[in-house]
Structure formats: C-alpha cells, structure tokens
C-alpha cells in the first residue's frame, strides 16, 4: 500500500515546517512530536520519507557508504576507488519500543572473536538509518540508555558498539524523529534538550477541518493508489523544493548581528547550556534556504526559536513545555540593530516559503503552541479557595524537597530504574550465571575457564582456543529497577488544618519527584467521606499525578478500610498487567477509621489482607498535636511495613524542619 501523501495531511503547519527543516539540515538534531493519540503524527513522518532525495551507495556495503566520500572506518571497508555503486531511495527505519541495545547499535559475535580472532559485526538499526530517517514512535517509553544512544549517534553522526574490549564504529547520519503522547509520561529534561526541535500537535476543533480529515482518510482507505496519484504532483514539487533548499543551505550567511540576536533570545528565555543557540542558528539557516534567501533574517530566527525553545524551558519535571510568544516578540524587537530598520515587520511578513502547491507550510505560524505558556505547573505556595458540599475544600501543595529513599526489599528483575535492587543486563557484575542460562553479555574469563580443560581432547592446534557452545558463560549483573509506587492518600477531614494538608501534599509531591527521578510508575488512590477512588491509574506520567494531587479535595469522614481495599485491588490488577514491576504501597494517613459500621475492625481486616500479599509498604504518619493516638504506627505494624512521621519524609529532616519553621 502506498503511504499517505505528505501534502494531503490537513493543517499542522508547525509539524510540517519542523519536518521539512530537519530534512533540509539533519544537523539540527531531529524533531520530537508531542501530541494526543490520533493526530496523524506517524502518518506525517512516514510520508516525509517519500519526499527525500535518493542516495548513491556502494554495492555490497551494508552501511550505505557514499561513493564520493566512503567512511574510512566502515566495517565493510576499505572501499577501493571507483567501486561499483547504485542509487536507492532514502530509507525510513522504525525503531520498536521493545528493541534491545544490540538490535539498535549492532552486535559482535564474541564466540567467533575468541575462536577465530575475527571481528564479525552485524549492523543494527542505526546502520540501516544512515543517510535516511530514524523514526521512534513512543520514544518516551524507551529505556533512557537507549534514548541516550540514539541521541548520541544523531549528534555525533557515528554509532559504536563495544563488548569485552572489542570496538567497532561506523557512520550513522540520519534525521531522528520521535513521537510521544504526553499522557503516557514525559521525557526527562536532559533528554528533551537533546532533540533539536519540538512540536505540540492537537486535533483541530474546527468542524469543517475535522470533516475534511475524515473525508480524505476514507478516500485513501478506499483506493490508496488513486488517492496518492491526486497528490503526486504536489509531493514532487515539495520534494524538489527540499532538494533545492538542501543545496542552498550550505551557502546561507549567518551574520554577526543574527548570531547576537539568537544569543539574546536564548539569554532572555534563560535556557541552560549552549545547545539552544546552536540549534536555532542551524534551524534559522535552514528556514532561510527554505524561503529562498541566502542570508538569515529576523523572521528566520523567529521561526527557529518557536520550534527550538519550548522544550528547553522546563525548570522542574512538573513544568509543561511552552514558549511565551509576546516575550519572544519583545526580545526580537529589543535585539534589533539601533542604526537601521528591521528586516521584517513582524510575524508573517517577508520571505514566504515556496507556494507551489504547499503554501500551508508558512513558516510555522499556523497553529498555536498547544496552550503551554510560561506557567509553572501550578505547584506554587498559593492556597486554593474552598467550596463544595460536605465541608469539601481544596488546599494547594507547597514546594517539593528531596525525599528519603524507600525501597522494596529483596532482588527483583523489573524495568530499569533507580530504586530497588534488581538483576539487570547492565550494572555491576556480581557473578556468573549457571550453565544453560544465556541472558546478559558473555563473560570472557568464565568462558575461557570452562573451555580450558577440554582443549587437549578437542585437538587444539596453535594458539587458538577451541570453543563449543556449551562453554559460553554469561555474566550476572546487578543494578536498580523502577517500581510501582502506589499512593493511598487519606483526604478526610481528620487530616487537620489547611497548613497540615499543605504539608501532606508537599510530602507526596516530593515523593512523586523522587519517583520521577527513579523511573518509577505511579498511581494514586484517595479516600474520604464514604468511598475510595482511583484518582490516577498506574502510569509513568508523574506530571499527571502531581496535577491530580494539586486539585485533590479534602473533608468528610475517614473510610480507611475502603482506601486499603481499593489499593489492594489496584495492585492485584497491575500485577497481571506488569508482573515484573514490584509494588511499593505508600499509605498517607493519621490512622483513624471513622466511616461506616465497624470502621476500625474493617480497617484492621483490610490491612491484614494487604500484609498477606507480601506487598512492601510505608505508612506516612500525618497525626499532629500533643495528644497522639499512635494509630498510624499500629497500621504500619499490621501491614508489616515501615512507619515514618510526616516530618521525616525529607532526606535531611532536621534541615527541612528548620526551613519550614523559618518560612
């Protein structure tokens, strides 16, 4: 089936522009596309591949070496001058979420290296993407070390695989495009910064445009060939413009005045490091070439900044990406040279890109930026007003702090993370796996020891080592895993005054921040009045959990038993969905049970039930005042869990208490 035509996609001018600019100048560093499901993110990326010019490659080279400039370190080289070559279309390589590192960077046959002294390198996906596109759907669900590997290769233009002292590298220059749904969790700021550009996409709210999207999609599904033929000429014109811009971008002049304006924009938005300046400079040059100019103008800087800055403004994990358009315009006006008129009159003026059938690529000013201005995520110290029936009220959280580390005992084998001990395929080596277990990387010394006693019987000759498959031994490595941290929060009236509830929310917010840093999955159960509810199903999006916590209403009686039973049910279901991720239950309460008949007895029974499942638990004691009943400590004992006072959640509890009292 022919891919959906690029020019047939309705709207999404910012995404269209970002993809085109990255195709013109791969050095920009790729594009991260953030948006809800069903917004044609994948459709546009796959359609882009058909617009890229073909590439000349050497015959028989698995690494797509350019005949005019072959890679001197190519594993299939050295390539002689004048070697046969052919032309093929640019490739689109898709990286599956579950791909292992060997599949991405390639692998070495260690057995053959030990036996024959030959480096046998099997190329991975990065080699396949060389001089083309590498597309990672749901990039936020990849392990961080894989994302690091991809971004390093995209930035350096090379991929390297190293195993037991054997190292092989090859050229890997590609346009990296990642898509993600923010509801499933954000990328960490240090990884976000490595993407050159970012675009926020949303589905249109205009009925006529939505109807046109459906009309075109149905027509494509009914007859893909004829539908694609209708847009073939527009796609060809767009492809020609991209190829012309690729030739022009090398000669675009970036003046000292333009560089100074870029620096002033980055300084005004207080972005960390120098990567933003470099990306904006490259993107502005590509935009100038796309518009047919040989000199970068303010309009080019404006378009580049709108795409390069939104994801670089996050100051903490709960901040939403975004850019203040008014601040950008004011900064550009302030940066104009004092002795001459500006080179354009503001957004949309001058230097329009080509209009031969694709005039909706208009410099990136068609769509809004997803509504993410310079908000601070809503985690300030301001209190919410109260309202609602039954004494319901809302109290905001204070600022988060560094929380104590709570872990799950034993050794797990779950997802990579930074909380509890686990057997992993990376980390420090703690031993050798028994014969027959072939997980992880081979252990050279143990393999040699296993083979050594059999060399005479195998007729060893010379200095080579005669290996058999049964000789291979694999390293056992121990690292850290991410866990499921399920918060069960008492939101009843017994939790005390506003100041106390603010402290409770600050503690939970701090633990959420800790969960984010440790690669955990989080969930939120709340209980108040007569019921308990799952406020947030288990997710890797701690940003969503923080938002739910911020708006959490309080008041009413304390249905402790219902809260514990709801938590037990959530843990049971999640164990079926994600069995390798061990849970940690954090119960935030003063331990009182006041809702329903036999409230105390039912809460004891629920706690005994949870303890019987063996789940690791922590009870955060929120009781205050001089007369204390010790009910939370009793609950912790029944759960066979750890008891910690609310004021002891901070990593440095004494310093935190001094700071709190001073405030």
Image (spheres, rainbow, N blue to C red):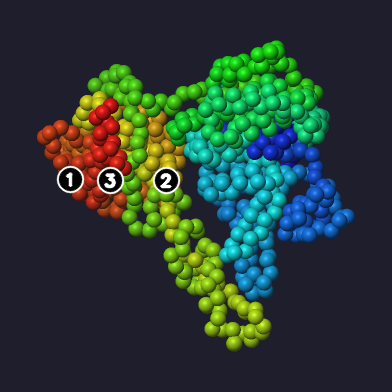
Q: Which residue is mark 3?
A: 618
Q: In the image, what residue occupies the spot 38% across and 30% down? A: 548
Q: In the image, what residue occupies the spot 49% across and 29% down? A: 320
Position of 541 with respect to 62 (left or right) is left
Between 283 and 420, the residue placed more toward the observer is 283
Q: Nearer the viewer, mark 3 or mark 2?
A: 2
Between 82 and 259, the residue placed more toward the observer is 259
Locate residue 31: give its quadrant. top right
Q: Where in the figure is residue 652, as x and y percent of width and height?
A: 29, 41
Q: Which residue is mark 1?
A: 634
- Mark-to-mark CA distance, 3 and 2: 17 Å
- Which of marks 2 and 3 precedes in the sequence? 2
- Label 3 packing within 10 angstroms: few (<14), some (14-19), many (20+): many
Q: Is residue 251 above or below residue 131?
A: above
Q: Quadrant of the N terminus?
A: top right
- Mark-to-mark CA distance, 3 and 1: 12 Å
Residue 40 seen in the current view: no
What secondary structure is found at the residue carrying circle 2? Answer: loop
Are discs 2 and 1 less than 8 Å apart at CB?
A: no
Q: Where in the figure is residue 541, as x and y percent of width and height?
A: 45, 37
Locate residue 452: give its quadrant. bottom right
- Which of the numbered marks, if any, corresponds to residue 518? 2
What secondary structure is found at the residue carrying circle 3? Answer: strand
Q: Quadrant of the C terminus?
A: top left
- Which of marks 1 and 3 precedes in the sequence? 3
């Amino acid at each position: 089936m022919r891919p959906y035509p690029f020019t047939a996609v309705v709207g999404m001018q910012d995404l269209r522009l970002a993809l085109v600019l990255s195709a013109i100048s791969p050095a920009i560093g790729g594009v991260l596309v953030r948006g809800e499901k069903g917004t044609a993110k994948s459709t546009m990326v796959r359609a882009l591949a058909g617009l890229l010019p073909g590439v000349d490659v050497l015959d028989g080279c698995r690494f797509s070496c350019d005949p005019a400039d072959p890679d001197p370190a190519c594993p299939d080289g050295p390539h002689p001058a004048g070697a046969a070559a052919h032309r093929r279309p640019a490739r689109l390589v898709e990286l599956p979420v579950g791909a292992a590192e060997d599949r991405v960077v390639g692998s070495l046959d260690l057995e053959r290296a030990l036996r024959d002294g030959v480096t046998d390198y099997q190329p991975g996906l990065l080699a396949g993407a060389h001089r083309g596109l590498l597309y990672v759907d749901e990039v936020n669900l990849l392990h961080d070390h894989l994302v690091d590997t991809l971004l390093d290769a995209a930035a350096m233009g090379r991929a390297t695989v190293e195993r037991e002292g054997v190292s092989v590298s090859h050229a890997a220059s590609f346009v990296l495009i990642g898509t993600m749904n923010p509801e499933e969790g954000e990328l960490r700021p240090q990884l976000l910064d490595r993407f050159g550009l970012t675009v926020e996409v949303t589905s249109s709210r205009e009925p006529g445009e939505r109807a046109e999207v459906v009309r075109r999609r149905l027509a494509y599904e009914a007859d893909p060939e004829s539908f694609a033929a209708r847009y073939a000429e527009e796609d060809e014109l767009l492809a020609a413009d991209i190829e012309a811009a690729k030739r022009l971008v090398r000669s675009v002049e970036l003046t000292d005045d333009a560089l100074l304006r870029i620096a002033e924009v980055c300084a005004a938005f207080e972005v960390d490091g120098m990567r933003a300046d470099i990306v904006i400079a490259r993107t502005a040059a590509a935009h100038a070439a796309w518009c047919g100019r040989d000199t970068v103008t303010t309009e080019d800087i404006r378009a580049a900044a709108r795409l390069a800055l939104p994801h670089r403004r996050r100051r903490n994990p709960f901040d939403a990406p975004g850019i203040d358009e008014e601040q950008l315009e004011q900064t550009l006006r302030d940066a104009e040279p004092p002795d001459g008129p500006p080179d354009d009159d503001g957004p949309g003026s001058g230097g329009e890109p080509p209009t031969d059938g694709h005039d909706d690529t208009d410099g990136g000013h068609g769509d809004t930026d997803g509504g993410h201005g310079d908000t601070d995520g809503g985690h300030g110290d301001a209190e919410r007003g109260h309202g609602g029936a039954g004494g319901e009220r809302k109290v905001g959280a204070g600022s988060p702090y560094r929380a104590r580390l709570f872990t799950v005992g034993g050794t797990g084998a779950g997802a990579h993370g930074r909380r509890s001990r686990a057997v992993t395929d990376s980390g420090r080596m703690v031993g050798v796996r028994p014969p027959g277990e072939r997980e992880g990387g081979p252990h050279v010394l143990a393999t040699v020891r296993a083979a050594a006693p059999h060399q005479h019987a195998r007729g060893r000759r010379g200095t080579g080592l005669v290996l058999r498959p049964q000789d291979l031994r694999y390293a056992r490595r121990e690292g850290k895993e991410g866990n499921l941290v399920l918060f069960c929060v008492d939101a009843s009236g017994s939790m005390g005054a506003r100041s106390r509830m603010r402290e409770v929310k600050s503690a939970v917010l701090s633990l959420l921040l800790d969960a984010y840093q440790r690669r955990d999955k989080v969930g939120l159960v709340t209980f108040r009045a007569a019921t308990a509810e799952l406020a947030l199903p288990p997710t890797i999006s701690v940003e969503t959990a923080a938002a739910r916590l911020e708006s959490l209403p309080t008041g009413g009686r304390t249905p402790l038993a219902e809260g514990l039973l709801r938590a037990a049910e959530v843990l049971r279901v999640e164990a079926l969905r994600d069995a390798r991720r061990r849970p940690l239950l954090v119960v935030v309460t003063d331990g009182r049970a006041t809702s329903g008949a036999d409230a105390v007895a039912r809460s004891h029974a629920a706690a005994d039930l949870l303890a019987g499942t063996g789940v690791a638990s922590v009870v955060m004691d929120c009781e205050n005042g001089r007369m204390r009943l010790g009910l939370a400590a009793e609950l912790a004992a029944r759960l066979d869990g750890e008891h910690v006072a609310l004021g002891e959640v901070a990593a440095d509890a004494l310093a935190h208490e001094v700071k709190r009292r001073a405030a």
